[in-house]
Image (cartoon, rainbow, N blue to C red):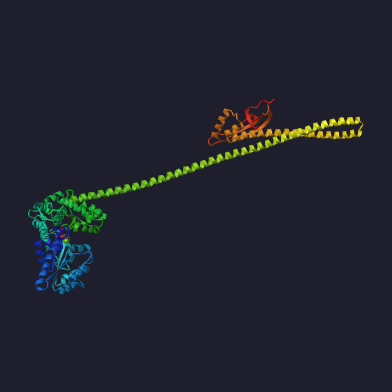
Amino acid sequence: MNDRPYTGLMPFSERQAPFFFGRDGERKIVAANLLASPLTVLYGPSGVGKSSLLNAGVASHLRRLAQRNQEEFGSPEFSVIVFSAWRDDPRCGLGRVLGQQVSEDVPGRLAEKLDWVSSRLECDLLVILDQFEEYFLYHPNEDCQSGFAREFVEAVNDSVRASFLISIREDSLAKLDRFEDAIPGILGNRLRVDHLNLDAAREAITKPIEQFNRLRSPDAPPVTIEDALVTKVLRQVATGRMVRAVSDDTLGRLSNAPHPGDERVETPYLQLVMTRLWNEEQRAGSRVMHVETLKRLGGAEKIVGTHLDAAMSSLTPSESEVAARIFNHLVTPSRTKIAHSIADLANYAGVTPDALALLLQKLSTGENRILVPVAPSLDGTTGVRYQILHDILASSVLEWRTRHVQGRQRAEAEAKAEEQRRRAEQEALARTRLRKLSVLLLMMVIVATASALIAGLQMRTAEARQLEAEAATLEAETAKHTAEARRLELEAAVKARTAAERSSDLNRLEAEAARAELRGALEQAKDLRQRAAEAKTQVDTAKAASVALSREAQKERKSAGSDGIDRALARYQAAYRTLDLDALLAVYPRLPNDRRKHLKQLRSVCTAYDVTLSVQRRSPSAGDAVMAEAETSYQCVPKAGSPPQAFQRSEAFWLRKDANGAWIIDNISTPLPRR
Ligand SMILES: Nc1ncnc2c1ncn2[C@@H]1O[C@H](COP(=O)(O)OP(=O)(O)OP(=O)(O)O)[C@@H](O)[C@H]1O
Ligand SMILES: [Mg+2]
């Protein structure tokens, strides 16, 4: 503390006694009571300065006295013990503190420990039990038959060399009833601590600075405070704006017009403002505490608001939420504080009274002090009540609450927006997946369709190739037949020439025979005749062979011609079947335009076009041309959705050989009438 003269919201400790002012009167009274009475009860509003008074005032003063005793008489007249840690088992905690006095573990119950320590120290023990209301908070169910209560009763009643001082918040004073039977007259010696009056408060502001200057090196320039600042702070934290935390009406509202001269100052508030001003000046490197700084910081009210924000930020999120739910009940519409019982506040917040009690404790202690407990209503209808530390906190409390609620709503809205964004992303992802799937399906359909088309095309190509192969076979056969016919014709010609030669031989032989006859060579004639007969037979045979061969050749020729015609007609059928215009033009080069158009139309409505030709009659026409009369049936294999088409007709196919000798259709007409 030597680096600053103010303590903030924490109570003064014994070490900070040099900076503790304004309580000289109270210090003397309390010390005298502690020395004279076996049991004293010190009470007062929360934050009034009880702990500070006991630590920095009473205990520090008594220890100095004891020290002086020690120095004067060789042993102290008394020893001071301060205890305030009630959360765990106080028997252990207090036992430990007593042990520290003699630097050893002390056995036995509390009374025995006290006897042991006092006899070891050879002095009386002055035991200060501070924050006694916390004993009731943490051990609500103990009675005087068990735990610390039992040992405490025994110690108070039996210890000859120990005096006790119970310091307790005013609002919990009634709880001491728990001990009334076991410790008769427990409330018989009561001292009440009130808030500092204005003079004491002025001391509490100025004297710590003087002490600060005294404790610094003499060379260091002193810190000063402007009188105007002291006045202004006192005005802002004193009566009219500051009011006592003791309720004096049943609703917990506080009278706001104290009598002149009865103005009081709540030291927590004073400490809060002065600590902030001190820190600001130090930060600025100033040695003077200026009234201007208070103005710049927005006055005491603003400083308190800043403190409130800092205090609230020390809460967990769930504690903040509960605080927000009770805060608006602790401030009236006219922005003054109003006290409510724990049960009511728990009801407003929707939590259990026990859970709320811990939060209220947190918000009414130490640096986080924002609330104060106040005594139950006078009619006894409520338990302990809580209110905000000061009216001046009212606006800050409501502003904090508004910010908290807005923050929560914003967080909820953001969470909702985040959830919606996440859902939208998922939907978009699903849509993308669906689109990809659709594209995949579409591609599969396209591939399947293309495959089907390719398969159809391949089938048609295979059919065309087969037809071409068949045509080539027929061509080859035709060529074979033609060659054979030519060979046979040649052979026939040779035979004919042989026959002619034989005939001339015959004539010659006959002439020779005649001449031989003439010469009378009958035998020779006979022989010659014989040979002539043989020759004649040979001629006849050759002639017959020639005729047969000619016939054969003719037949072959006819067959060759006939196959070529059939092939041409087959090609015609095949071209129609596959609706292949090129193939049709190959066999029917002079295909009329109307037929071309017709074929194209057929393509759009038919998957195939069956043509059946039944040739009824063939008749040679001029030169290498042939006319074949046929009954023709045309039948469309319709595509889906197209009407079926079929018709029959008689047609005359006029065929001729092209330059390569292949039969082609020259023209198709209706047949000539039969004669
Ligand atoms: N004489 C004083 N001068 C200046 N500040 C004081 C003085 N006495 C107490 N204070 C300040 O008042 C505040 C409350 O003091 P303290 O904790 O001692 O009160 P309390 O009555 O013990 O409170 P609680 O009821 O919470 O136990 C602290 O900030 C403390 O520094
Ligand atoms: Mg205290």
Residue 60, horizontal then vertical, whole percent: 13, 65
Q: Is residue 526 above or below residue 242?
A: above
Which residue is most to the front? Answer: 519
Name which quarter of the figure residue 553 lies in: top right
Question: Residue 435's x, y, as percent?
Answer: 43, 43
Number of numbered callouts drawn: 0
Residue 321 located left or right of residue 235: right
The location of residue 145, given as percent across then percent down, is: 21, 69
Q: Nearer the viewer, residue 212 or 670?
A: 212
| Residue 192 appears in the rendering | no
The N terminus is located in which quarter? Answer: bottom left
Q: Is residue 324 above or below residue 470?
A: below
Residue 94, image quadrant: bottom left
Using the image as rendered, state which of residue 353 and residue 418 is in the foreground.
418
Residue at image point 83% right, 34% down: 537
Please state the quadrant of the image where ligand 1 appears: bottom left
Residue 670 visible, this angle:
yes
Viewer-proximal residue among 357 and 52:
52
Query: Which residue does the image show at 68% across and 33% down from the upper left?
Result: 562
Q: Give x and y (percent) for residue 141.
A: 23, 64
- For the C terminus, the image quarter is top right
> Looking at the picture, does residue 159 appear above or below residue 52?
below
In the shown orientation, is residue 599 left or right of residue 501?
left
Direction left: furthest residue: 261
